[in-house]
Amino acid sequence: AHRVKTVAGRMNVAGEEIRPFDAEGARTAAAWFRDQGVNTIGVCFLHSYANGENELRAKRIVLQHLASATRAFNVVRAKSGLSHQLAR
């Protein structure tokens, strides 16, 4: 759990936003992972099966901060990389 970071943002079960996505928090988390040498990141937001927008926004931010993550997301995409893709 020492390499788990939480980013604010919440959808309800219907996929409606009930707490805004915290882009600055996502940038801070991505920079922390980069500084720690982490190059594989899992992104999972609650109720993302109903609306995956927060996961997609987090992915874009991670890709901006971690050049090595581009390869990781491309590899994982073949296996449904973001949790909202697993429910489809």
Image (cartoon, rainbow, N blue to C red):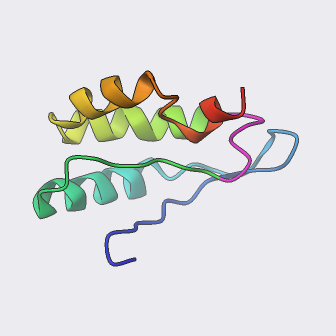
Q: In the image, which residues are magenta?
A: 46-51
Vertical side of 81 occupied by 12: above or below:
below
Instruction: For residue 52, say whether it is visible.
Output: no
Reply above or below: 15 against 7. above
Any part of residue 9 in sight: yes
Image quarter hosting the C terminus: top right
Viewer-nearest residue: 33 or 21: 33
- Farthest residue toward the bottom? 2
What's the residue at 32%, 50% (across, down)?
A: 27
Most frequent secondary structure within the magenta stretch: loop
Query: Does the stretch in magenta take in 49?
Result: yes
Quadrant where the N terminus sits is: bottom left
Which residue sits at x=63%, y=50%? 20
Point 40% across, 66% down: residue: 5
Residue 11 in percent (x, y) is at 74, 48
Q: Where residue 39 appears, x then y in whole percent?
A: 20, 47
